[in-house]
């Protein structure tokens, strides 16, 4: 493989000979491994590798851009601006690592492992999971909705401690009590009701962005807005029961959810 840097370019340059012809262009990335992956993908494209699949080619740049335009922005009405921007930043960093011209079909277990290793040098495992999850969602969308990828490579996430998932139903009953008391007060106070609605909208925006990924990955057919509402109202129901001293079946339900998510 022949990738190198020029003094006037931050990105690696790809240059090689194939069938007596010289090919040269920017890799679009500052990461050498990603540049090498982009070179391999370009060579495969020139040789016509994978044409038998009948799938149209798509680069990681095209996939991330299409995902942002067709998935992230349409949900913008429900998302906070900073949530949308966070998604855009994750997609930009994914593109930067693999190289804008890398075909998504060239991203396999080795490339994903390299991506994970590089991320762990600078960010926490939770951030690595979020970025890997975003990549997986893009690839799943490319396969199931755009028809530009035959198979999604396995992407193994860290199995993080899930204490934070249990937060609202176990650790902070005081918070739950205050939140429900505020809602009860808001029934007869329009100004307070408006303020609580804004807080609810912020929670809903965060869940909408997070669940959009999960819904695609797990093949949940329920509309995204309905799924978010189901979880929000489910959580309120659990809170009300716990404050009334009722915990029957709660642990069994949480254990079942954990088992289902780990399949």
Image (tube, rainbow, N blue to C red):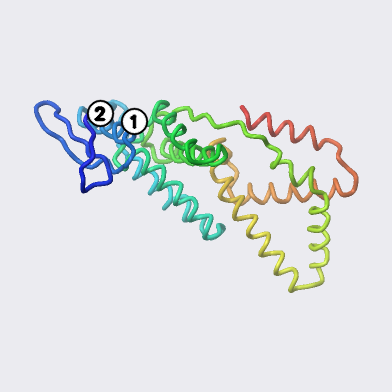
* Front in this rendered view, residue 127 or 181: 127
Residue 222, which numbered label?
Answer: none
Based on the displayed image, in which of its 4 quarters is residue 129 positioned?
A: top right
Does residue 185 sit above or below 11 in this rendering?
A: below
- Place of residue 240 in the rendered image (x, y in percent of width and height, measured from the top left): 83, 50
Residue 34 falls left or right of residue 206: left
Give the position of the N terminus as an image quadrant.
top left
Mark 2 burial class by Cα count in 10 Å: few <14, some 14-19, many 20+: some
Based on the displayed image, in which of its 4 quarters is residue 18 positioned?
A: top left
Residue 141 falls left or right of residue 213: left
- Place of residue 241 in the rendered image (x, y in percent of width and height, measured from the top left): 85, 47
Give the residue displayed 26% in from the left and 40% down from the top: 12
Secondary structure of the residue carrying numbered label 1: helix
Q: Which residue is mark 1?
A: 106
Mark 1 burial class by Cα count in 10 Å: few <14, some 14-19, many 20+: some
Number of numbered markers: 2
Tags 1 and 2 touching, CB below 8 Å: yes
């Amino acid at each position: 493989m022949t990738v190198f840097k020029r003094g006037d370019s931050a990105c690696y340059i790809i240059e090689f000979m194939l069938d007596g012809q010289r090919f040269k262009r920017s890799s679009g990335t500052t990461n050498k491994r990603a540049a090498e992956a982009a070179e391999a993908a370009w060579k495969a494209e020139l040789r016509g590798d994978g044409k038998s699949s009948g799938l149209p080619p798509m680069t990681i740049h095209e996939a991330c851009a299409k995902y942002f335009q067709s998935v992230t922005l349409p949900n913008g009405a429900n998302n906070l601006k900073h949530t949308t921007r966070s998604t855009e930043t994750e997609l930009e960093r994914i593109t930067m690592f693999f190289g804008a011209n890398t075909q998504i079909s060239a991203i396999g277990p080795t490339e994903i492992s390299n991506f994970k290793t590089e991320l762990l040098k600078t960010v926490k495992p939770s951030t690595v999971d979020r970025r890997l999850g975003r990549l997986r969602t893009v690839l799943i969308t490319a396969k199931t909705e755009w028809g530009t990828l035959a198979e999604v490579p396995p992407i193994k996430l860290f199995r993080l401690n899930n204490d934070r998932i249990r937060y609202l139903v176990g650790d902070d009953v005081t918070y739950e009590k205050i939140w429900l008391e505020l809602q009860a007060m808001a029934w007869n106070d329009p100004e307070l009701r408006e303020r609580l609605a804004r807080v609810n909208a912020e929670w809903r925006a965060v869940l909408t962005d997070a669940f959009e990924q999960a819904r695609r990955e797990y093949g949940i057919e329920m509309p995204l807005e309905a799924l978010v509402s189901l979880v929000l109202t489910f959580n309120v129901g659990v809170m009300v029961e716990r404050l009334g001293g009722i915990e029957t079946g709660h642990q069994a339900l949480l254990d079942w959810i954990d088992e289902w998510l780990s399949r």
